[in-house]
Image: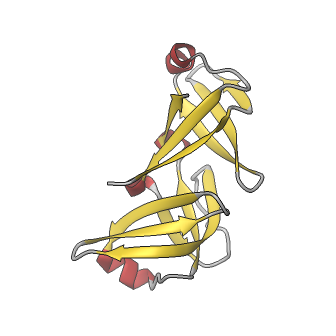
Amino acid sequence: MRRKVVRSGVAILLTALAGTGACRPAPPAKRLIAVITTYSQKQLGLKPGSLIAAEIKAPWVVLYKGGEAPKCTAENRFLGSVLRISKGKINSEVVVQISDSTELCSVLTEKSRKALQIKEGDTVWAVFNAASVVINVD
């Protein structure tokens, strides 16, 4: 199972009763939003400017085909191009390039990939919830 790691600094910390949200710049001029608990924020020592690594597991990344932004509740939405597809009998791994230096990987059933008619070079949206982002400190 592939996991994408994005390294950057925390731009904004938003604290609420239920937890903490960490925003980090994501290329190109986009933001990656993560929801973590206040306890985790304190344990990691996160504050604006902290260097972090954000991980998004491939099964948590949902793909939408086409250039129009999907209408969904996911906080993280990145437009990209399908770079490569590794087809399996049951599942397929689709790598989406969202900037010159950043790729996201999605795992979906081969049946779903065929139904969506996703192929290399297609424009897709890679979408995932803020709760699906794992934060590590460098």
Q: Above or below — where is 5 with respect to 50?
A: below
Q: Above or below — where is 11 with respect to 50?
A: below
Residue 17 horizontal side relative to residue 13, left or right: left
Q: Quadrant of residue 16?
A: top right
Q: Above or below — where is 106 with respect to 75?
A: below
Which residue is found at the position 58% from the left and 60% from the top?
72
Which residue is found at the position 59% from the left and 67% from the top?
125
Q: Nearer the viewer, residue 8 or 64?
A: 8
Q: Quadrant of the C terminus?
A: top right
Q: Quadrant of residue 28?
A: bottom right
* Residue 68, position as x, y percentages in the image: 68, 74
* Residue 123, position as x, y percentages in the image: 61, 77
Q: How many numbered marks have been drawn onto this rendered protein structure?
A: 0
Residue 10 horizontal side relative to residue 133, left or right: right
Q: Quadrant of residue 107?
A: bottom left
Q: Nearer the viewer, residue 124 or 2?
A: 2
Colour pattern: secondary structure
* Residue 129, position as x, y percentages in the image: 53, 48
* Residue 113, position as x, y percentages in the image: 39, 78
Residue 6 horizontal side relative to residue 107, left or right: right
Q: Nearer the viewer, residue 46 or 66?
A: 46
Q: Quadrant of the N terminus?
A: bottom left
Which residue is found at the position 73% from the left and 26% from the top?
49
Which residue is found at the position 50% from the left and 30% from the top?
136
Kindly give the residue lying farthest to the right in the view shown: 29
Q: Above or below — where is 74 with respect to 18?
A: below
